[in-house]
Image: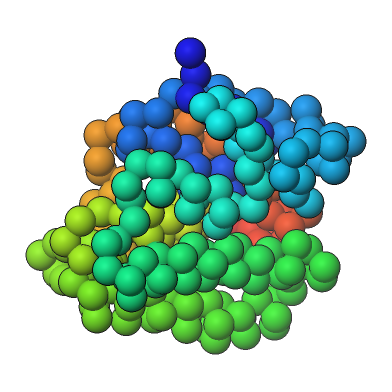
């Protein structure tokens, strides 16, 4: 019997966070197109959410929505949260930071499409600042050139989320890898370290055949590719 059902589109964007986590812990899951719930049934499920991803937990027979909430649910279930109170709180903060970066890089769900001036301002300002925030957090809590993790000596949900955020970003838009190396070299190394974990590596190789270099899809992704010259 499966452990979970994951409802999302055939794009990495938010779904890859959950898939990477489930791969690392060896959980079984089935992928379902988000249209099975969104938008017609999105208010009808238990614990409704505004938009995908949705995760159905077979054990509890409940739906979960909102990416940070889903990741926290899984982290508790599989003991992927730091033990100390401070770093436990920081793990939640990092999940929320990841969600904020996704919101900002899509220009607030595509409220306005990117143009060259607005993108350059974001890329050299807030996006660079976000990278430095993750870098500083890691350096203050055990991440170093030779290894370590974002919040200590053991992998946690924070590491998987960080790798999902920046690994997906630079894979979809290789030109941004230089930005990550410049602003957050230890995070760039952490991304490679997490992506090289055998279950995650196998999942990414399999799914990237489908995703190719896709990111978030639609007009938002098109505007990103235009301003990045891709």
Tell me which residue sits at (28%, 73%) in the image. Answer: 138
Which percent across, then down, holds residue 201? Answer: 32, 36
Q: Is residue 121 visible?
A: yes
Residue 108 position (above or below residue 51): below
Q: Is residue 100 left or right of residue 161?
A: right
Tell me which residue sits at (29%, 49%) in the image. Answer: 194
The colour scheme is rainbow
Q: Is residue 223 left or right of residue 135?
A: right
| Residue 60 vs residue 136, the one in the foreground | 60
| Residue 22 vs residue 179, the one in the foreground | 22
- The outermost residue toward the right is 40
Residue 2 position (above or below residue 225): above
Image quadrant containing the C terminus: bottom right
| Residue 220 vs residue 148, the one in the foreground | 148
Tell me which residue sits at (60%, 37%) in the image. Answer: 55
Residue 187 position (above or below residue 50): below
Which image quarter: residue 156?
bottom left
- The outermost residue toward the top is 1
Tell me which residue sits at (24%, 81%) in the image. Answer: 140
Q: Is residue 43 left or right of residue 67?
A: right
Q: Is residue 8 left or right of residue 93?
A: right
| Residue 133 vs residue 219, the one in the foreground | 133
Q: Is residue 170 visible?
A: no
Which percent across, then down, holds residue 124? Answer: 53, 83
Which percent across, then down, holds residue 41? Answer: 85, 35
Which percent across, then down, holds residue 206? Answer: 43, 27
Which image quarter: residue 133?
bottom left
């Amino acid at each position: 019997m499966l452990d979970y059902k994951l409802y999302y589109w055939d794009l990495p964007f938010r779904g890859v966070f959950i898939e990477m986590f489930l791969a690392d812990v060896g959980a079984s899951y089935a992928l379902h197109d988000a249209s099975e719930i969104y938008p017609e049934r999105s208010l009808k499920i238990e614990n409704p959410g505004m938009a995908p991803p949705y995760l159905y937990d077979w054990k509890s027979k409940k739906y979960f929505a909102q990416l940070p909430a889903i990741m926290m649910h899984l982290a508790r279930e599989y003991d992927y949260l730091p033990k100390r109170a401070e770093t436990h709180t920081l793990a939640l903060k990092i999940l929320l930071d990841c969600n904020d970066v996704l919101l900002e890089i899509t220009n607030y769900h595509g409220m306005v499409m990117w143009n060259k001036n607005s993108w350059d301002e974001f890329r050299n300002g807030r996006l660079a600042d976000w990278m430095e925030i993750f870098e500083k957090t890691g350096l203050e809590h055990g991440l170093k050139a030779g290894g370590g993790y974002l919040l200590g000596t053991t992998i946690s949900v924070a590491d998987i989320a960080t790798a999902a955020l920046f690994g997906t970003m630079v894979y979809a838009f290789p030109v941004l890898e230089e930005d990550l190396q410049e602003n957050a070299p230890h995070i760039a190394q952490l991304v490679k370290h997490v992506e090289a974990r055998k279950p995650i590596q196998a999942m990414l190789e399999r799914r990237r055949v489908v995703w190719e270099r896709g990111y978030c899809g639609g007009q938002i992704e098109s505007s990103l590719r235009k301003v990045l010259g891709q």
